[in-house]
Structure formats: C-alpha cells, structure tokens
Image (tube, rainbow, N blue to C red):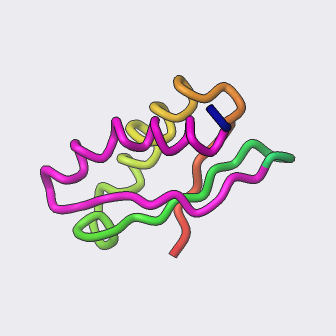
Amino acid sequence: MTLIERIEAALETARPHLAVDGGNVEFVRYEPETGVVEIRFLGACKNCSMSAMTLRAGIERTLRMSVQEVRRVESVS
C-alpha cells in the first residue's frame, strides 16, 4: 500500500464522524519534506466553528497514529 493510499484509508475512518454533521474531508496533497498533509473540509465542515478542533484532535491525531510519516495536517481552501 502506498503512502497516499494509507493516508486515504486513515481519512476513511474519520469520514463517518464528519458525515454525521453533514461534513466531509478531501485529501489535497502530502509534502514529503515536511511531513505535512493538506486537506480540504467539505460540506458543513467548511464553515463550522469547531473545524480547527476537528482538524487537530480528530483528523491530525488519526493520521499521525495511522501513518508515521505524517507530522502535521493543515486545512486549505
């Protein structure tokens, strides 16, 4: 399984939690030099006041635990 496939698989575990509130997340890119994954919030998550907490406590935590190469996750527009 490639690194990108592992990132996508980890995001799949987070998606059901986001979908409950009408949201989703999209993988944008991975920067190998820094270990940063860029994601885009979709649906209700785009304008949610809790998206920063979801990013750090939910998505980033899930990705870092599942994919050791990931050091940080950033949200892009």
For the record, the magenta segment spans 3-31
Q: Quadrant of residue 62?
A: top left
Residue 28: percent from left, percent from top: 58, 63
Name the residue: 13% across, 50% down: 20
Residue 23: percent from left, percent from top: 24, 61
Q: Quadrant of residue 45?
A: bottom left
- Identify which residue, 1 or 46, lies in the foreground: 1
Name the residue: 63% across, 50% down: 37
Q: Looking at the image, is 61 positioned above or below residue 56?
A: above
Query: Which quarter of the figure is the N terminus placed in?
Result: top right
Name the residue: 48% across, 32% down: 61
Is 42 displayed left or right of 63 in the figure? left
- Give the residue at the far left of this rendering: 20
- Give the residue at the far front of this rendering: 1
Residue 21: percent from left, percent from top: 14, 56
Q: Looking at the image, is 72 positioned above or below residue 66?
A: below
- Give the residue at the far right of this rendering: 33
Is 21 displayed left or right of 42 in the figure? left
The tally of labels here is: 0
- Identify which residue, 74 or 12, lies in the foreground: 12
Q: Tell whether position 54 is magenta.
A: no
Q: Tell whether position 20 is magenta.
A: yes
- Identify which residue, 52 or 19, lies in the foreground: 19
Residue 77: percent from left, percent from top: 51, 76
